[in-house]
Image: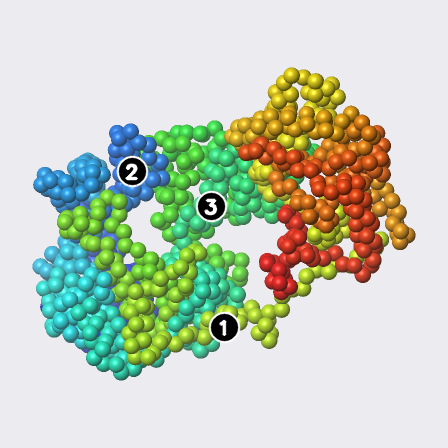
């Protein structure tokens, strides 16, 4: 048996190519088997490097799991037996049938399972079947034996039910496959490997035969490798077998050790480690790194050796990035990769299982016009065409609510026959016209009504946009439920109409072709799936498309770049196996990322998998450890990267990093920090190293431009946030309402104000209320009417919210009935004015232009003495007396001062009898009367004098309109806070940002 290994630290593929070429045989005569297609392509490149580009007839190079039937039958010398195997069932058909079985099981139990969850569980069930077939275990036989022996009695009841269902599946599934003339893909692959192993055992192929870098341990692959090892010119080349590990530690290897799979493979081959020959190879990593990793990753039995030799560890070429978060980690990695390009000919790679981190790095590299692609690809569900499908379904299912509608119309593929730029421009105009603020009524009819009611209601371009949209989505509007094929056909028709373009539209590019194939497969297998609703189709498609990845060239489009950078690579763990470059960055080294969290799946627990002979989930940790150890020795320079936080949560460093830190700490060492982290932190730092925060805005417009009319509420704003007055009245800026604005406390306050104004401002109704026997009922009726009007005229106030508010309004009615009686009796009210508007115009003493103060009093009562009493309704916070006296909350006193100066038509007041706030919350208590303390007339005059001083101050050309000038007195609602960049400078003046 011929088994060899290429030592860790040597470039695997280059060494393999060199040994192959050093043999006297014809280099083009033979077959080399590798674990993946990427490794097969990389070996061809290694041959070119070894021969320095000299023309060469290469041997056949193939991936062990990717040989097609023609290559197996015609090129490998073992007859047509493989061609006689039944074809493999299509993956989509398999998942469709399994999900239907799962759905039937749930329905039989009286439960409804969403289609997306059924599909997801079918995927897990398919993986379980694959695991059993890969291990050549008859899962059905094992299940029936376990159920017959009372095995399930040792587990919870739900596991017994699960095992019974699996028993049904394992009885039905083989029969269904046989009826269709199909077999599972993994079973077909395992059978093909067995046939190949048998053929090569009986008649080895002519020429040299090498199986290199393969460490899988399933029985069929092991049988094939055994046939290679026994062939006269065959050899199995193992990647990085540790021949220096002591026998004690070799025997104690657990499943999570990097060498565990290689030991298991040797056992399957019936070989001993002593029989393995180390091929001569020149290492590219500093001496001592392999020994360091061996020591760091020793099994528990060998940890005592850490204390036996405390000599300094070899850390040449090893550095570390420990970033605060994923964004900082990505920036540092991008800088390290960019730095690698400074050395001519140097090749560098990022290896990580974290695709989100890889995407961040790819984006960060674009800062220097360095374009690379993630070799893993991107999820099909995240590509623009798939996102368009999802947004289309969301918009239709949510009756064209503003947020999903705008997301759809602004999608880069949506043109509606107008061109992408024109379509987005119209979408923005439609947004400003009617999609900000309260949501329009549902459906396209509601959208048309909202547009018609806006100032742009007669704009033919916007009307035409809605017409085009309605025409495009018409096929989908008529399909609320049906067969999957019917729904998908309607979705495709609508999406094609939305994205009509000369450039290919929905199906352009690699991602469009991949989505087309995926949807065609779903339509073709829809007969196996139960009918579904349109509102569940989006989640189903997400679940069905997420496992599929597609390699696109989106990062290169529109940049004038024909190909990604030839010396930088971004690899996943599978793509990186057997590769070698000059610098490797191992990133995402955190628990749950690398290694990934182990999960036995929903169908069998860990003890069950062990009892049935299936691999434990922890074996995946061993494979990840093998990748880590191999990649750490795959380049002269390695960078170990981890962030302290991921997705907002603390991230625990990988167990291998923890071991490395502990091992080095015992020797007084630590992994040196890579300078890229410092570069990243300094990259956007200004020259000199100190960031100068922006200064607070201090606009000083000419007096002629300053406002000469303000309301009483704006006077309080001028004191607390003068910049808001500048932005509103001088810059003439208005805050845009958010799209699909939801109801808030202000809506409840308006209902209370409108209801009370309606009944108290109506003379006959007020007289009936005062003299009637049931004032509470009359008030409740008025508040109910105001609520009904709000529900009918404001879509953002839902019926559910109205039902929540109605009891509060009735409690307010009861409280107001009693408080109204007492108020009127105490003051002798003879006339009541509600929502009373008025203004007073005066000329400042400094001779500047006249100033007008306007206001609207919630309620103004005239008393029998000719005085006035003012009430202000508050459904929220009530101003404190000290703030009113200090002039910070001057609305009510200023309204009183206006009344004394004849600002309100029909009210000739000589005195101010009272000022009070009614807090109307509808809670417990339902209301409270809070009269202002002190002499009402004096408060009014003090407020007026304060107003005159304030106007005089801002008539000074040097007086600036500051933003939040007085800490602790910031307005509760600050529309212009972001415009003033308050958060950037507040901390510099001791104010909380």
Kind of element beneath mark 3: helix
Q: Quadrant of residue 457?
A: top right
Residue sitting nearer the eye, 360 or 196: 360
Q: Which quadrant of the figure contains the C terminus?
A: bottom right
Q: Is residue 456 at least partly visible in the picture?
A: no
Q: Earlier in the sequence, mark 2 or mark 3?
A: 2
Q: Are marks 1 and 3 in contact (CB under 8 Å)?
A: no
Q: Which residue is mark 1?
A: 679
The single residue placed furthest to the right in the displayed view is 847
Q: Are marks 1 and 2 in contact (CB under 8 Å)?
A: no
Mark 1, mark 3: which one is toward the viewer? 1
Mark 1, mark 2: which one is toward the viewer? 1
Residue sitting nearer the eye, 400 or 808: 808
For the residues labelled 1 and 2, the Cα–Cα distance comes to: 51 Å
Q: What's the residue at 25%, 70% (across, down)?
A: 297
In the shown orientation, is residue 564 left or right of residue 52? right
Q: Residues within 10 Å of mark 1 (few under 14, many from 20)?
A: some
Q: Position of residue 585 (x, y in %)?
A: 38, 69
Q: Position of residue 544 (x, y in %)?
A: 36, 43
Q: Which residue is mark 3?
A: 387
Q: Earlier in the sequence, mark 1 or mark 3?
A: 3
Q: How many marks?
A: 3
Q: Is residue 949 above or below residue 125?
A: below
Q: Which residue is mark 2?
A: 99
């Amino acid at each position: 048996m011929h088994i060899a290994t290429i030592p860790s630290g040597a470039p695997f593929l280059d060494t393999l190519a060199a040994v192959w070429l050093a043999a006297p045989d014809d280099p083009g005569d033979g077959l080399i088997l590798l674990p993946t297609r990427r490794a097969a392509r990389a070996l061809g490149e290694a041959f070119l490097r070894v021969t320095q580009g000299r023309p060469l007839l290469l041997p056949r190079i193939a991936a062990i799991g990717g040989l097609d039937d023609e290559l197996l039958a015609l090129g490998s010398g073992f007859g047509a037996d493989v061609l006689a195997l039944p074809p493999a069932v299509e993956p989509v058909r398999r998942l469709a049938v399994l999900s239907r079985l799962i759905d039937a099981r749930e329905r039989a139990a009286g439960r409804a399972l969403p289609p997306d969850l059924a599909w997801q569980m079918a995927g897990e069930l398919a993986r379980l079947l694959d695991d059993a077939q890969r291990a050549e275990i008859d899962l059905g036989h094992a299940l029936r034996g376990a159920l017959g022996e009372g095995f399930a009695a040792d587990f919870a009841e739900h596991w017994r039910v699960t095992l019974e269902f699996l028993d049904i599946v394992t009885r039905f599934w083989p029969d269904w496959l046989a009826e269709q003339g199909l077999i599972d893909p993994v079973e077909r692959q395992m059978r093909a490997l067995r046939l190949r192993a048998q053929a090569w055992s009986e008649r080895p192929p002519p020429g040299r035969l090498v199986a290199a870098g393969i460490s899988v341990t399933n029985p069929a692959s092991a049988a094939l490798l055994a046939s290679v090892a026994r062939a006269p010119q065959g050899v199995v080349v193992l990647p990085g077998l540790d021949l220096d590990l002591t026998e004690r530690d070799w025997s104690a290897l657990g499943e999570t050790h990097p060498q565990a799979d290689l030991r298991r493979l040797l056992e399957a081959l019936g070989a001993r480690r002593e029989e393995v020959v180390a091929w001569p190879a020149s290492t590219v990593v500093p001496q001592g790194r392999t020994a360091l990793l061996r020591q760091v990753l020793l099994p528990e039995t060998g940890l005592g050796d850490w204390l036996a030799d405390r000599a300094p560890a070899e850390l040449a070429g090893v550095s570390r990035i420990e970033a605060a978060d994923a964004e900082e980690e990505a920036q540092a990695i991008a800088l390290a990769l960019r730095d690698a390009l400074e050395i001519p000919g140097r090749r560098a790679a990022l290896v990580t299982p974290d695709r989100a981190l890889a995407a961040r790095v790819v984006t960060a590299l674009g800062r220097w016009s360095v374009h690379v692609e993630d070799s893993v690809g991107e999820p099909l569900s995240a590509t623009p065409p798939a996102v368009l499908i999802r947004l289309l379904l969301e918009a239709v299912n949510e009756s064209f609510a503003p947020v999903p509608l705008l997301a759809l119309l602004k999608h880069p593929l949506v043109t509606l026959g107008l061109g992408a730029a024109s379509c987005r421009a119209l979408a923005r105009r439609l947004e400003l016209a009617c999609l900000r603020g309260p949501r329009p009524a549902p459906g396209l009819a509601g959208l048309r009504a909202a547009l018609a009611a806006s100032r742009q209601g007669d704009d033919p371009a916007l009307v035409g946009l809605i017409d085009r949209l309605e025409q495009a989505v018409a096929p989908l509007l008529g399909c609320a439920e049906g067969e999957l094929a019917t729904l998908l056909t309607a979705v495709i028709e609508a999406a094609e109409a939305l994205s009509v373009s000369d450039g290919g539209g929905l199906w352009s590019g690699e991602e469009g072709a991949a989505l087309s194939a995926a949807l065609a497969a779903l339509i073709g297998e829809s007969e196996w799936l139960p009918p579904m609703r349109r509102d569940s189709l989006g989640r189903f498609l997400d679940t069905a498309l997420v496992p599929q990845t597609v390699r696109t060239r989106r990062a290169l489009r529109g940049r004038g770049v024909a190909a990604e950078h030839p010396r930088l690579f971004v690899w996943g763990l599978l793509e990186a196996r057997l590769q070698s470059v000059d610098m490797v960055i191992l990133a995402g080294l955190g628990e749950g990322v690398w290694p990934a969290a182990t999960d036995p799946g929903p169908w069998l627990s860990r003890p069950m998998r062990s009892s049935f002979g299936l691999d434990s989930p922890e074996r995946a940790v061993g494979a990840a450890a093998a990748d880590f150890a191999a990649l750490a020795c795959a380049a002269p320079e390695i960078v170990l990267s981890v962030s302290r936080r991921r997705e907002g949560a603390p991230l625990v460093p990988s167990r291998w990093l923890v071991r490395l830190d502990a091992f080095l700490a015992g020797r007084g060492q630590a992994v040196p920090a890579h300078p890229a982290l410092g570069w990243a932190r300094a990259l956007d730092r200004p020259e000199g190293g100190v960031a100068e925060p922006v200064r607070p805005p201090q606009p000083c417009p000419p007096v002629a431009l300053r406002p000469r009319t303000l309301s009483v509420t704006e006077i309080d704003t001028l004191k607390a946030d003068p910049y808001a007055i500048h932005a509103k009245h001088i810059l003439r800026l208005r805050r845009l309402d958010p799209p699909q604005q939801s109801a808030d406390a202000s809506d409840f306050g308006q209902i209370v104000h409108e209801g009370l104004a309606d009944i108290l401002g109506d003379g006959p109704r007020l007289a009936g209320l005062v003299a009637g026997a049931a004032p509470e009922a009359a008030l409740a009726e008025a508040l109910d009417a105001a609520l009904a009007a709000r529900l009918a005229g404001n879509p953002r106030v839902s019926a559910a919210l109205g039902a929540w508010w109605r009891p509060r309004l009735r409690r307010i009615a009861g409280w107001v009935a009693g408080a109204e009686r007492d108020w009127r009796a105490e003051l002798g009210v003879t006339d009541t004015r509600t929502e009373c508007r008025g203004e007073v115009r005066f000329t400042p003493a400094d001779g500047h232009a006249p100033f007008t103060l306007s206001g609207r009093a919630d309620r103004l009562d005239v008393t029998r003495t000719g005085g006035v009493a003012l009430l202000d309704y508050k459904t929220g916070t009530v101003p404190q007396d000290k703030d009113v006296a200090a002039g910070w909350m001057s609305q009510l006193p200023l309204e009183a001062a206006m009344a004394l100066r004849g600002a309100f038509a029909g009210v000739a007041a000589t005195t101010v009898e009272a000022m009070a706030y009614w807090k109307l919350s509808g809670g417990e208590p339902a209301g409270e009367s809070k009269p202002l303390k002190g002499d009402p007339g004096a408060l009014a005059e003090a407020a007026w004098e304060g107003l005159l001083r304030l106007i005089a101050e801002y008539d000074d050309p040097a007086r600036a309109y500051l933003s939040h000038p007085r800490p602790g007195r910031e307005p509760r609602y600050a529309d212009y806070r972001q415009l003033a960049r308050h958060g950037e400078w507040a901390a510099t003046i001791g104010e909380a940002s």
